Amino acid sequence: MKKYIADNIVNMPTSGIRKFFDVVSTMEGVISLGVGEPDFETPWHVREAAVTSIEKGKTAYTSNQGMVPLRKAIADYLFEKYNIKYHAEEEILITVGASEGIDLALRALCNPGDEVLVVEPSYVSYKPCVVMAGGVPVTVTTKEENDFRLTVKDIEEKLTEKTKVLILPYPNNPTGAIMEKKDLEAISDIIIKNDLIVISDEIYAELTYGRHHISVASLPGMHERTIVLNGFSKAFAMTGWRLGYAAAPKIFIEQMTKIHQYIIMCAPTMSQYAGFEALISEDREEDVDIMREAYDERRRVMVDGFRNMGLSCFEPMGAFYVFPCIKSTGLTSEEFCERLLFEENVAVVPGTAFGDCGEGFIRCSYAYSIENIREALERIEKFVKKIKLEK
Amino acid sequence: MRVEILSLLEKNSEISLENIAETLGISKEAVAAEIKSLEEEKVICGYSAIVNWEKTEKRYVTALIEVKVTPQRGDGFDRIADRILRFPEVKSVYLMSGGFDLTVIVEGKDIKEVAFFVSDKLSTINAVTGTATHFVLKTYKDHGIIMGQNLKSDERMIVSP
């Protein structure tokens, strides 16, 4: 059968998450720290807005780019929150999750052979999307000693004449790292000098702890060369609604909209009504604050938990993951995760699912109740003790 | 810190000192001291379980009684409220705005018992000029807790990117 399938798809590796999921699915009574989505439900008033839209029969397509009021609400929100200014009708495109935005941006930018810098560890879909767009993914590895931030040196080492795009995934899944203003300023010079385009995946922008997210597009000279991707999934606990957006200068949005109109038509109409309510509601900040505060509490419990069991654990400043280092156990990431699963019934994700440089790390999500987290930590501690005795 | 401790206890009075301390990032001793003074100052007036009696053998009825009273010189409604709240069958008493004055929530083992309370004890108080008794048919939510709802299971996939 394989001969029927296109070579570049056959050669595309299965996501490490998928593989692990298949193993986990065979088990019962598993305590998981494995999910990449909030444990909150979408705020009720947002759900109600979608129900109302359905009751009113708002069930037709919207314009390809998405409802204008929603685009206006997004433009206002981005300006208010991140001080980046976009023209609602020409510079914003509503997508089916930020995931679609990644695909559209890469397809719009890549000529065959163009090199795309993919920062790793990072979300699983960047590299496959670069390949499908005809580009060549080039890994840029961030390091724990730099707090998993991207440095000028990291970029310089991988620059060639063919480098065209940089995918900037901060706040980062799986490390929880963020880029502060000074970090972004440091890399913006080299980006401008080499005329690179930045695809900035800011889906976790609302979830930073102790400091606000800075968008790279807000820096001098960066607005015109940045495609900002964001969405409702993480900020408003709306993963299943599949609603995201791209914000960028007209030259990019115009071309991305062409692809979007041929493959998607428009994002689901009821989701757009829900997203509109989420943004314009006077409860907006409170909705997010409640979740952010809960994550922050759990974040502390997680980091302390791992450090107390003698594992080095980088303190995450964003998203809802910790990325502890398990090298001291002498196991590889996959061995660690499989044995932890079979011996203690706890599911965490091997760091290697997020790039080869994730070897020696595991990703643990704290989008769980405190009770669930404590129970999981106890079991992991027991497991780590056992492994260290074996050595 | 007071408000944070109180919100945690209001949600779950069984929460351990360790949990509160960890959640708020303060020492266990500081939490214990604060709770002690909250109790002494009667900011925390008591701890009780929220019971779904419908799931038990116990036969009982709850009634909400609207009471109209003549306020008394000098004391307003306070003295009359004080008389009513001393009856052991009275669970709560509120002073209300609007068409009547006090809401009295009463529990009894059956309708007869509550009716007896209203006719014999409540209506006979001099200042009470009228009552309207409403019986509760079903409790959906009490003290912020949704009754009869099973714990929601985590419907997310076990592992996702």
Image (spheres, coloured by chain):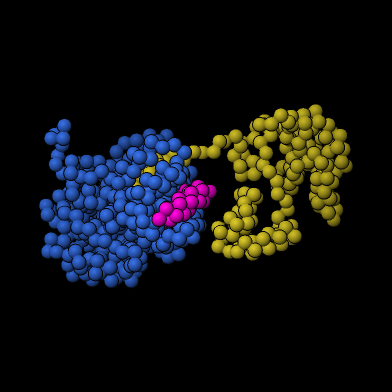
Chain colours: A blue, B yellow
Q: In the displayed structure, would residue A237 be above or below residue A194?
A: above
Q: Which of the image's four quarters has the N terminus of chain B? A: bottom right
Specify whether residue A122 is in view. no
Residue A39 percent across, percent down from the top left = 45, 46
Residue at point 72% right, 51% down?
B46
Which region is colored magenta? A367-391
**Left or right of A285 on screen, residue A217:** left
Q: Is residue B90 magenta?
A: no
Q: In the displayed structure, would residue A61 be above or below residue A221?
A: above
**Left or right of A317 on screen, residue A154:** left
Specify the quadrant of the image occupied by residue A32. top left
Q: Is residue A369 magenta?
A: yes
Residue at point 40% right, 55% down?
A391
Residue A220 percent across, percent down from the top left = 27, 70
The front one of A174 and A378 is A378
Residue A31 percent across, percent down from the top left = 46, 44
The front one of A344 and A83 is A344
Residue B68 percent across, percent down from the top left = 78, 41
Specify whether residue A141 is in view. yes
The front one of B38 and B122 is B38
**Left or right of A137 on screen, residue A323:** right
Q: In the displayed structure, would residue A353 be above or below residue A263?
A: below
Examine the residues drawn in magenta and state their main secondary structure: helix
Residue at point 25% right, 69% down?
A152
Residue at point 78% right, 33% down?
B108
